[in-house]
Image (cartoon, coloured by chain):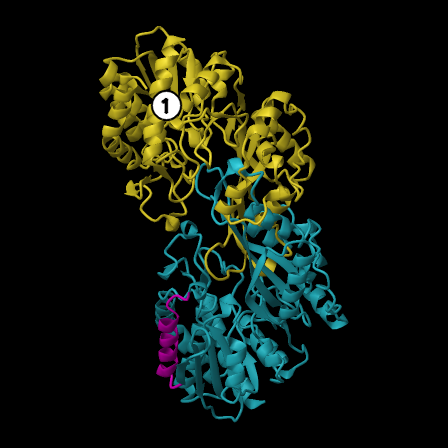
Chain colours: A cyan, B yellow
């Protein structure tokens, strides 16, 4: 290791406590995008934090929540784009948190809070890298453009229009996305693909008001209507029954198959983490890793009628379901929404209203792009082994906004360990993962500037 | 009308405001049995109110909420039992109430509050009748035994054992139940039957905790499991698919059929009340009145995963449904619960847990019993026309505890108008209906004492 890199690593280590304080400040703002909560406040704080580093940043309006865009020039003419988001998932169920979700608490080498990892922690790791580069080199090795949105957790509904309107400010030679992480055994992973998303709210309003259930065989029941409608979408075989749903699916390529085969099995850890004896459909072996190449239809929420303790005998007037579909390349979320509408109509469920709450396309990165290879090597410098390439992850981010527009390479895969309880109670980040991610980013920017 | 009856009617009228104040006091106690809320307090107040009339009353312990039992002798050796309940349904959804549910408010000749009709209002109407009889006659015409329970709205789970243990104190020659009422056109109705009830909570715990929905094709989803399980219980044809469910159903008798044919259609008013163009299964004409002779399987509540605003992408760990079955004579709720368990097991839903929250048998009254005829006549004196006989109502009360034990006659049908919004927001009672019910009860007790 060069003296310069040693100095950078040392700077990150020495300032880790200060960065955790900044992370705590960010996590104290309950920027739950689903509830439009504290989003301006959080965007302002992010812009201020970037500004402190000499990154000229502004919280800009979008059709939804504000988007922070920042830029700083570097020594080389090349520019790296950082994508992050300042919004978080709702904290519920609150009773399962061991410390308050919006009060960062450090225990056993981890910082606990909603957003600790996803994605405030990742943002802070990048700040730590920038700080170290500025302190040791007196400047940035390459230009940095920062894009920090506030609607990632609700499907980035307004980001496409925002990016379109700000293409010139967002021009870049590469991009570092959120997500990625470490395997169970500490091996870094680099994601080459994310699934798309269609998130819908289905609603049935069957009656003007709830009724006494003595009239249950005279009155339509919103809960039953919704149950029957949902049961037509997917059976216990997990096959999605919406006509046309699978039409655009591409087969897994030979290259993707090879990459899948190199991945260690996550079967045991998933089973342990969720208290399961077997996975869905008894998936085992290679079928676990390749599951991300299949789309899903997931009921994320369901509510109707009386849900309190004990009993109440009513025919519910209203029933609502939240359903998310994870999609693969070439599946268009808006086309799927149309297919869903047609399917429900054809099955006699014209009374089921659909509201689209999120629509994003999948994205794929070329495994042979130079930045992918560079990122594998820099990962090796930090973690002792080159990054494993994951051809497709289960989740969704709006990476397609750059991959589809010819941004030459996009390299995710500088995240944290897998035990972060992302989206769950007790979300947390390991302090040394923030440190290592910062070290990795600093190396990646340095090497990227030379290419 | 005799001078005595005129004096009784006058007493009721003159004291109606004072009785409404008592009803307001009762309704101010949020005795929601589903939440075990304020039940001791409400039972104590009922006992105190009975005591004020010289009815020796006590709030007695049961395996659940306290039961108030009161008794007063009368001039004849015959005893009438009054059944009432002091508990109420939960008030939700709160935002639909025009005045607070536990703050009685009089508007346009109606008193609004949870329990205004069901069943605190009916209790107060009986108190008004007792007051008038005591004032005018100086005593009661017959003995009165009062049974006021606190778990009717949760299926009276502990009443059977209580009644069994207090049979001698509850001995009676007739009983006046709750419920009954007036038709749309002001004609009194007298109910000859109530359906039974099986109320169950179904629950699936699929995961140790909610998961990110990126893992939806690896993890079992509690909401999907519950949806699929529920969909096996009943299809859109409304036919209940639990094997054996219909086995014990008796056909409608000729006498019941005749009584049904005499009933005016409620089709138009139900449609109007619930904003419907057509009733379930396009029921119309005689099929509306006879619906109560068919059992039901009703989803009264449903909850799983994220139910807040916007979107959250999770695989829910837990899903719960509340399901009530309305049953007919000879359908045993515990046998149905066994059939449900077996059905779910056979269909592969051993993971769906069943908790029985309520189990009551149906009850039938002989249409030719003398008290039934007497009640028709006294109704005519008050309402200008004899009571219509309704062979079976949609709802459930634990009347079977007396009909099955050979109490010779049970005569429900001294309730109020149908626009009470029972179990719904803005439950209310018309003041003049309380007055007329009191007048009716006073006549019924007087004539009953002579038979």
Q: Does residue B216 belong to the magenta stretch?
A: no
Q: Residue A448, position in %: x, y? A: 55, 86
What range is drawn magenta here? A36-55
At x 52%, y 64%, the residue is A417
Find residue B117 and report its image quarter.
Answer: top left
- Whole-percent x, y for residue B152 in the image: 43, 29
Q: Note whether residue B201 is visible.
A: no
> How many labels sit on residues?
1
Q: Position of residue B76 (x, y in %)?
A: 33, 7
Q: Residues within 10 Å of mark 1 (few under 14, many from 20)?
A: many
Is disc 1 placed on a helix, strand or loop?
helix
> Horizontally, is A138 left or right of A348 in the view?
left
Q: In this rendering, is residue B379 above or below B77? A: below
Above or below, B253 relative to A22 = above
Name of the residue lying farthest toward the top: B77
Query: Which residue sits furthest front?
Result: B1
The residue indicated by pointer 1 is B440
Q: Residue at x 36, y 27 (%)?
A: B437
Q: What residue is shown at x 31% (from left), y 45% (from top)?
A: B100
Location of the C terminus of chain B (image quadrant) = top left
Q: Please identify the quadrant where the N terminus of chain B is shown.
A: top left
The secondary structure making up most of the magenta span is helix
- Residue A335 seen from this side: yes
Q: Tell me: B229 left or right of B160.
A: right
Q: Quadrant of residue A395?
A: bottom right
Q: x, y (%) of residue B90?
A: 40, 40
- Residue A42 located within the stretch drawn in magenta: yes
The reply, left or right, for residue A370 in relation to residue A49 is right
In the depicted view, which residue is nearer to us: B267 or A399? B267
């Amino acid at each position: 290791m060069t003296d310069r890199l040693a100095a950078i690593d040392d700077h990150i280590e020495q300032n880790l406590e200060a960065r955790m304080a900044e992370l705590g400040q960010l996590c104290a703002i309950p920027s739950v995008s689903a509830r439009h909560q504290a989003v301006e406040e959080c965007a302002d704080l992010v812009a201020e934090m970037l500004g402190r580093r000499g990154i000229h940043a502004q919280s800009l309006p979008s059709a939804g929540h504000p988007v922070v865009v920042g830029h700083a020039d570097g020594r080389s003419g090349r520019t790296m784009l950082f994508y992050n988001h300042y919004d978080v998932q709702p904290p519920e169920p609150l009773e399962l948190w061991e410390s308050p979700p919006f009060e960062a608490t450090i225990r056993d080498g981890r910082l606990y809070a909603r957003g600790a990892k996803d994605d405030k922690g990742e943002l802070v790791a990048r700040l730590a890298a920038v700080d170290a580069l500025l302190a040791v080199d007196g400047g940035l090795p390459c230009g940095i453009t920062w894009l920090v949105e506030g609607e990632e957790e609700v499907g980035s509904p307004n980001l496409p229009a925002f990016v379109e309107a700000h293409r010139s400010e967002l021009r870049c030679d590469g991009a570092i996305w959120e997500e990625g992480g470490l395997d169970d055994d500490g091996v870094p992973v680099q994601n080459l693909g994310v699934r798309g998303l269609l998130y819908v709210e289905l609603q049935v309003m069957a009656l003007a008001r709830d009724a006494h259930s003595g009239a249950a065989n005279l009155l339509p029941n919103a809960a039953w209507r919704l149950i029957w409608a949902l049961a037509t979408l997917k059976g216990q075989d997990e096959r999605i029954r919406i006509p046309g749903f699978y039409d655009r699916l591409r087969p897994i390529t030979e290259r993707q198959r090879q990459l899948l085969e190199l991945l260690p099995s996550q079967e045991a850890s998933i089973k342990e983490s969720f208290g399961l004896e077997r996975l869905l459909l008894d998936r085992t072996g290679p079928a676990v890793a390749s599951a991300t190449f299949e789309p899903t239809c997931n009921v994320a929420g369901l509510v109707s009628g009386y849900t309190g303790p004990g009993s109440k005998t009513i025919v519910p007037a209203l029933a609502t379901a939240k359903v998310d579909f994870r999609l693969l390349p070439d599946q268009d979320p808006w086309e799927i929404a149309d297919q869903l509408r047609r399917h429900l109509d054809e099955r006699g469920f014209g009374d089921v209203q659909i509201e689209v709450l999120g629509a994003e396309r999948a994205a794929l990165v070329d495994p042979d792009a130079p930045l992918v290879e560079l990122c594998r090597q820099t990962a090796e410098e930090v973690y002792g082994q080159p990054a494993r390439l994951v051809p497709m992850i289960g989740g969704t981010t709006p990476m397609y906004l750059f991959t589809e527009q010819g941004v030459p390479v996009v390299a995710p895969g500088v995240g944290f360990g897998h035990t972060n309880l992302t989206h769950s109670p007790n979300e947390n980040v390991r302090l040394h993962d923030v440190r290592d991610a910062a070290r990795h980013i600093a190396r990646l920017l340095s090497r990227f500037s030379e290419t």
